[in-house]
Amino acid sequence: MLWFLLRRLAAGVLLLFAISFVSFVLLSVPHLDVARQLVGQAATQDVVDAKNAALGLDQPVLARYADWLGDAVTGDLGRSWFTSENVVTAIGNRLPVTLSLMLGVTLVTAVLAFTLGVWAGVRRGAVDRFVQVLGVLGYALPGFLVTLVIVLVFAVQLRWFPAIGYIPLTTSVPGWSSTVVLPILSLSVASVAGVSQQVRGSVIDVLRQDYVRTLRARGLPPRRVLFRHVLRNASAPALTVLGMQFVGLLGGAVLVEQIFGLPGIGSMTVTYTTRGDTPIIMGLVMTTVVCVVVINLAVDVLIGWLNPKARTS
């Protein structure tokens, strides 16, 4: 198991370095005159050149990347070119908001998707068709439309939750929960639809296996067969999809945070990308990749625990 974890961790570190290099090179392609934006349109070219030199933009890309990487491995991601705010501090202040959404959506998806998927896979018939229809509708409906309906119903009409704004968890637990319920609900619809279909298919496939028929023929209680044997073997594909859904939430959070006025890294990405603030953008890229590596590692560990054969693959 230890060697399995070390291999996965090494792959994650290599992925981190590869994406950091590609991202830095792409951001170095001239597209926005950052120095001109900082010193103003009325500044002379000499002033612009001096600002480029101060930012290190007059150096070769590889030299700049080496300098950035040397600082990054020590935890120093630099400062924003536009606000002079420390990158680690800026992202650290906003990351808990996005993580609250992602963890909340993952929990809701895991509970509802596994419940619906197992229910449909075991009962079949009308129940199966009902769950499949729900899955198709949930996956096909545009995210912005789902979010709009949720806001209109629960915030505008019923007034159960606020439509916009965010209250930190450290300030008020009830206030925090009231501000994240609607964003989590809007992000969960498509996730539940996708994962529940995967769980359903996996459960049906496992139920058709010979060893399940043997267990039933030996007189084992149906619940024991389902939860100890069927669900254990059917969970691996569903966990993989769940991990992919978690990663995909990083993109969906951009829209949801903009709509609900949440100060997370999704809305932060939009703001600083349009400015061309490379230190902040690189910090966001690294944060995203670290989240992806951690989630994939957690999924691999769970799958390896459920299915020991996966550790050698």
Image: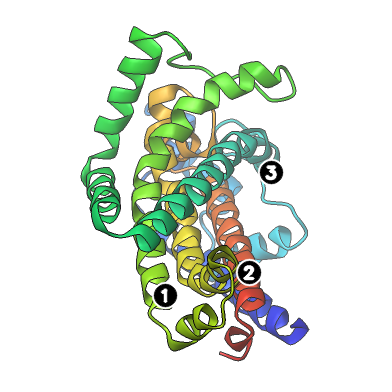
**Disc 1 residue crowd, few under 14, some 14–19, many 20+, Cα 10 Å:** many
Badge 1 is on which residue? 207
- Quadrant the N terminus occupies: bottom right
Mark-to-mark CA distance, 1 and 3: 49 Å
Mark-to-mark CA distance, 3 and 2: 30 Å
**Disc 3 residue crowd, few under 14, some 14–19, many 20+, Cα 10 Å:** some
Expressed as whole percent of the image width and height from the top left, the position of residue 38 reads: 48, 33
Expressed as whole percent of the image width and height from the top left, the position of residue 102 reads: 53, 44
**Are the residues tagged 1 and 3 within 8 Å (C-beta)?**
no
**Between 77 and 1, the one nearer to me in the picture:** 1
Badge 2 is on which residue? 302
Residue 60 in view, yes or no: no
Mark-to-mark CA distance, 1 and 2: 21 Å
Q: Which residue is at a point 34% across and 50% down the rendered structure image? A: 193
- The amino acid marked with disc number 2 is Leu
Badge 3 is on which residue? 88
Q: Which residue is at a point 29% across and 32% down the rendered structure image? A: 146
Q: Secondary structure at mark 3?
A: helix
